[in-house]
Amino acid sequence: MDHEGDANRTDLMTITRFVLNEQSKYAESRGDFTILISHIVLGCKFVCSSVNKAGLAKILGLAGDTNVQGEEQKKLDVISNEVFVKALISSGRTCLLVSEENEDAIIVPPAQRGKYLVVFDPLDGSSNIDCGVSIGTIFGIYMVKDTNNVSVEDALQPGSSLVAAGYCMYGSSCTFVLSTGNGVNGFTLDPSLGEFILTHPNIKIPKKGKIYSVNEGNAKNWDEPTTKYVESCKFPQDGSSPKSLRYIGSMVADIHRTLLYGGIFMYPADKKSPNGKLRVLYEVFPMSYLMEQAGGQAFTGKQRALDLVPEKIHDRSPIFLGSYDEIEKMKELYAESKANGA
């Protein structure tokens, strides 16, 4: 019998154990962050279960409303949003919540208030529910200095102030990717245990990549640097092989692949969406934070993405995320374009 193999299989690093280990490194820690993460994890497990049985439970199809982005809300969007709002408030560790599905920020009642602010997209890529493509939850966590005087302005912080960020992807398996500022770690849900197990320790994005990911349907509206970069992916002038195009249209799935395999994910500004399409607080910032923690870069076309300061909670921005060298190329093209006055 393989006793050593059995022993390894029983020594499982669960996400709770992992976060507790991180907590023990800080003498002043009171466990508030650990409790908050456990509530986010619980919300993800609930949504994962709902996604898996969505067709059977007849909760697919439209809920009849549109959200603040003008997107038709599916029933799973509504359920996911309610689950996360309730889980986060009941944790007793949050004071302000910003969700993609709510026009206004949610200020937590004083009796249930804690020191954390959570920004989240409860179900990103929900237009893909009906066809079984991977979808996910994205979140970012900030700290608020004065929990007695909480206002929406507390949410308008640069991404560099994040204390943690992550996403949970609901696909062929349920994967939870988290960074608390000390690298990026991936956990996979073991359905038989109901626990997230560490399966991707210390994720590092390759320095270069062979994949580019962008919606080429918008190509006619792109600016010059984006057009040139994509052209160089298809028709490299240095004798190298062309890059492969992979675009799922679900940000969590596209970013997850980019993190693991390298390359670049782009959602540039164009004539149709001059400010870009992805939302700064709960899409651009958390994914940029993870990308930098994994050794990659995140760039808006003008500056480092995490240095952006949003003016409104649903602000949008162009974004280029991925391998260090690929983003360097993108930066060079934008600098060249600026120098030429384009």
Image: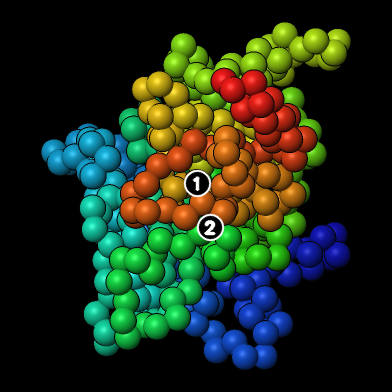
| Vertical placement of residue 244 versus 8, above or below | above
| Element marked by disc 2 | helix
Q: Position of residue 111 (x, y in %)?
A: 27, 87
Q: Position of residue 265 (x, y in %)?
A: 59, 32
Position of the N terminus, as image quadrant, is bottom right
Q: Position of residue 50 (x, y in %)?
A: 34, 50
Give whichever of 227, 104 is nearer the camera. 227
Tell me which numbered mark, 1 or 2, is placed earlier along the sequence: 2
What label does residue 159 carry, if any? Answer: 2
Left or right: 329 as drawn, with respect to 275: right
Rounded to the nearest whole Å, what is the CA distance between mark 1 and mark 2?
9 Å
Which residue is depicted at the point 19% across and 40% down? Answer: 66
Give whichever of 78, 233 is nearer the camera. 233
| Vertical placement of residue 225 versus 298, above or below | above
Q: Position of residue 72 (x, y in %)?
A: 22, 35
What label does residue 303 carry, if any? Answer: none
Circle 1 is placed at which residue position? 284
Which residue is depicted at the point 58% across and 72% down? Answer: 16
Q: Tell me if I can see residue 253 in this picture.
A: no
